[in-house]
Amino acid sequence: MIAICFGIGLGVLVGVVVLFQTNKGEETKVIPITRENDQQKAVDEDVPANASGTNLSVSSPANNSIVSKNSIEIAGVAKKNSLLVIQSASAEKIQKNENEEFKVETPLAVGENVIQISAYSDSSTPQEQTLRIYYIPAE
Amino acid sequence: MKKYLSIIFVLSLLFAVTQTPAYSQSPTKEVSEVLDSQVQELKDKVAEKVEELKERKKQAVSGIIQEIKNNVITILNAENNKIDVDVDDTLTSYYDIVGTKVKDSSKDNVEKGDYIFVTGPEIGETVTANEVYTDTQYIVMSGKITEVNAEDFTIKMVTIDKTNYILDIEKSSKRNLLDIKTLKTVSIGFSKLKEGDSVHAVVKADIEKPDQTHFSAIKLLIIPNEYFLQ
C-alpha cells in the first residue's frame, strides 16, 4: 500500500514538475517574439503621418507613374485647416483641409501631367510638391 | 500484489503517454515557428520586390533630347540629370501627343530639342525604351506678384526659390481669383491682379530657351493676400 501511494505521489510530483518546466519553456520562447512585435507596432502607431515635420506629404500616386485613366486620386497628409491648391495644365482644385488626410480626384490630360500640390497653413508661403503623371489611354 | 503492480504499471503508462509528447513537441514546435517566421519573411521580401519591379515598370522618364547617337537618345530631365534611352528599330514604338490624341509616329520624326517621355525598364541611368512619346512641356510655378504692368499687360512674380519671372497676360490666359469667403474661384480681368497676392501659374516651356524667365501665361490662379490676414 505504501509502495502504491509512493508510486502515485512520485508520478504526480514528476508530472507537476514536467508540466511547470514545459510551460516555463513555452513562455520564454513565445514572449520575446510577441513583445518585439508589440513594440514595433507601438512605435509605428506613435509616428505621426507627417513625421518629417513638413506640412505636406503626398503618399500617392508615385511620381512618374503611368496610368490609363483620365483622372487620378491624389492622397496625402497636410496640416489641419491648410488651404490645398492642386494645379496642372488641365486641373485646378482648391479646398480647405478639414482633417490631416486628404484625397482629391484630379483630371488628367493625355500625355505628361505636371501637377503641383501646394499647402498653405500658417503663412502665405506654401509647402509644395510636384508630380509628373503620364496618362496614356488604353487602346 | 500483482494487482497493485498492474495499477502502478497502468499509471506509469498513462503518465508516460500524457507527458512524453510535451517533451517531444516543444522543440518541434520551436523549429516549426522559426521556419514559419523565415518562410513568411522570405514571402514578404519576394512580394516587396515584385511590387517594386511592377511599380518601376509603370513609370516613365521625360526630358529634352540633347543628342541622338546610333540607338541611344540622351535626354535632360527636369532635375538636370542626363538619361540615356536605348531604342531598338524593331521593338521601340514612337508616338506624338497631339491635343487629346496619341498619334503614331516614327524615329525619323524625333529630333534634338524635342520634349519626350519614355516608357520601359530603367536600369541605373539607362532606360530601354518600349515607347517614345513626343509631348509639350508645361511648367507649373507659384509665388507672389511683385509688379503689375498695365501698359504691356505683364506681371512680375517671384517664386519660393527667389527666381523672378515675367508673365505675359494674354486674352486667352485663364485668370481665376479665390473668393476667400466661399473658397470658390471666379474669373477676373487683368485689373484685379495686384502686388502681394499669391499666384499659381501654368506656362508652356520654350524648349529652345531652357533658361527663359519670360513666358506667356496659360492659366493663373490668384489667392488674395487678404486670405492670410483673416
Image (cartoon, coloured by chain):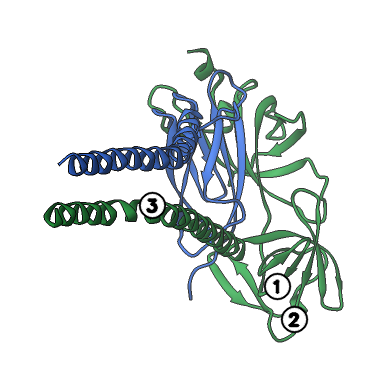
Chain colours: A blue, B green
Instruction: Assign a secondary structure to mark 1.
Output: loop
Q: Nearer the viewer, residue B203 or A123?
A: A123
Which of label 2 and label 3 is nearer to you? 3
**Mark 1 and 2 residues: CB-CB less than 8 Å, in contact?**
yes
* Residue type at tag 1: Ala
Q: Chain of mark 2?
A: B
Between discs 1 and 2, the one toward the N terminus = 2
Query: Which structural element holds mark 3?
Result: helix
In this rendering, position of residue B8 left or right of residue B102 = left
Mark 2–mark 3 Cα distance, whole angstroms, equals 66 Å
Outermost residue, front side: B1
Q: Nearer the viewer, mark 3 or mark 1?
A: 3
The image quadrant that residue A19 belongs to is: top left
Circles 3 and 1, Cβ within 8 Å, touching? The answer is no
Q: Position of residue A86 (x, y in %)?
A: 52, 40
Q: Earlier in the sequence, mark 2 or mark 3?
A: 3
Q: Is residue B185 visible?
A: no
Farthest residue in the bottom direction? B90
Distance from Cα at disc 3 to Cα at disc 1:
62 Å
Residue at the location (21% across, 43% down)?
Answer: A3
Q: In which chain is the residue bearing label 1?
A: B
Tag 2 and tag 3 share a subunit: yes
Q: Are callouts 1 and 2 both on one chain?
A: yes
Q: Residues within 10 Å of mark 3 (few under 14, many from 20)?
A: few
Kindly identify the residue that appears in the image at 60 percent across and 30 percent down. A52
Q: Which residue is rendered at x = 76% and y = 28% of the image?
A: B162
Q: What residue did someone put label 3 on? A: B23
Q: Tell which subunit mark 3 falls on.
A: B
Q: Which residue is mark 2?
A: B88
